[in-house]
Image: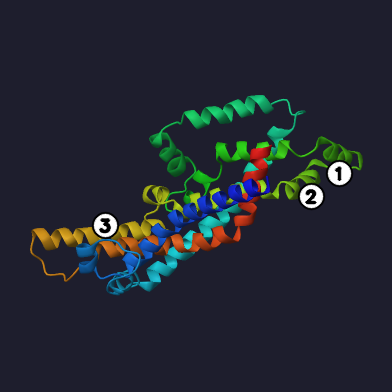
Amino acid sequence: MKREGLAIRAISNMALIFLAVCCIVPFLSVISSSLTEESYLTRYGYNLLPKKFDFSAYKLLFTNGNTLRNAYMVTAFVTAAGTVGSIVVSAQFAYTLSRREFMLSKFLSLYLFITMLFSGGMVPWYILITRYLHLKDSLFALIIPCLVSSWNIFLLKSHFKAVPEEVIEAARIDGANEFYIFYGIVFPIAKGGIATVAIFIMLTFWNDWYNNMLFITSPEKYSLQYMLQSLLLKVETLQIAQSSLGADVGEIPKNSIRMATCVAAAGPMVFVFSFFQKYFVKGITVGSIK
C-alpha cells in the first residue's frame, strides 16, 4: 500500500507539473515575442527565447508615457472602487438570500436567475446609463454597469449558507443586530469565498473595455484596455497605409506590439492573483465540499 501511495503521488505531481508548464509556456512566449525584432518574428515565428532582442514595441507603447500612466490610474481606480463596491453590494444581497427566515428569498433568487438568462438589450441599457442616470463620459459609467453580477451573488450565497445557524442565533441572543452579525461574524468566516469572488470581480473590471467604448469620450478617461486597443488599431491603420498607398512609415512592429500590449495589460493582474492565490484555492476547495 505504501508503494502504491508513492506511485499515485508521483503521478499526481507529474500531472501537476505538466499542467503548470502548459500554463507558463504561453506566457513566456508572449514575453519573448514582445522582445523580438519584427522581421525575426515574421521569419521564425514565436519562440521561448528571443532570437534578436528589440525593444521597439515597448518604445512605441511608451511613446506617450503620460497617456499610458493616466490609463493605468483610471483602470486602477475603477478596478479598486468597483471591486469594493461590488463585494459590499453582492455580499449583503447574498447574505439576505441565504437566510431562511427571509420571506422573499425564493422570489429574489428566481428573479436573479432570470436575469442570467435574459437581458433588456443593449439599446435600453445604453439609454438607461446615458439619459436617465446621466453617466455619459463619467468614470461611474465604468463601475455601475458591472457592479452586480447574479453569478457572484449565487456563489456568495452558497458560502453564507454554510455558516452554522447556531453561531448566528447565539449572536442574536447576545443582542447583536443583523449589521454586526454580517460584518463581525459571517463576513470573516466566509472570507475565503469572498476573496475568490473578489478576484473574479477584479478581473472583470480590469479587462473591461466595452463600457469604455460606449460611454467614454474624453481621452483622459480611457481605461488601459481601451487605450491599448486604440493603439493596436492605429498600428494596423499605419500598416494598411504602408502596403496600399506606399507610404514610408518605417518598420511597424505589428506582431510584437500585440504581445507587448498583452504584457502591459496582464502584468499587474499576475501579481494580484499570486497574492490572493491562497484565498482563491481555499475558497474553491471549501465551496466544492459544501
Q: What's under tag 1, amino acid-wise?
A: Ala
Tag 2: amino acid: Gly
Residue occupying image coordinates x 39% and y 72%: 66
Query: Where is residue 72, by image quadrant?
Result: bottom left
Looking at this view, is 44 or 243 the one in front?
Answer: 44
Marker disc for residue 184: 2
How far apart marks 3 and 2 lie (CA) works out to 49 Å
Kindly identify which residue carries mark 1: 176
Of the two numbered discs 3 and 2 on the same chain, state the one appearing first in sequence: 2
Mark 3–mark 1 Cα distance, whole angstroms, equals 57 Å
Label 1 environment density (alpha carbons within 10 Å; few <14, some 14–19, many ≥20): some
On residue 253, the disc is none
Q: Which residue appears at 75% of the width and 50% of the height?
A: 188
Q: Which residue is denoted by mark 3 in the rendering?
A: 233
Above or below, 114 against 168 in this view is above
Secondary structure type for disc 1: loop
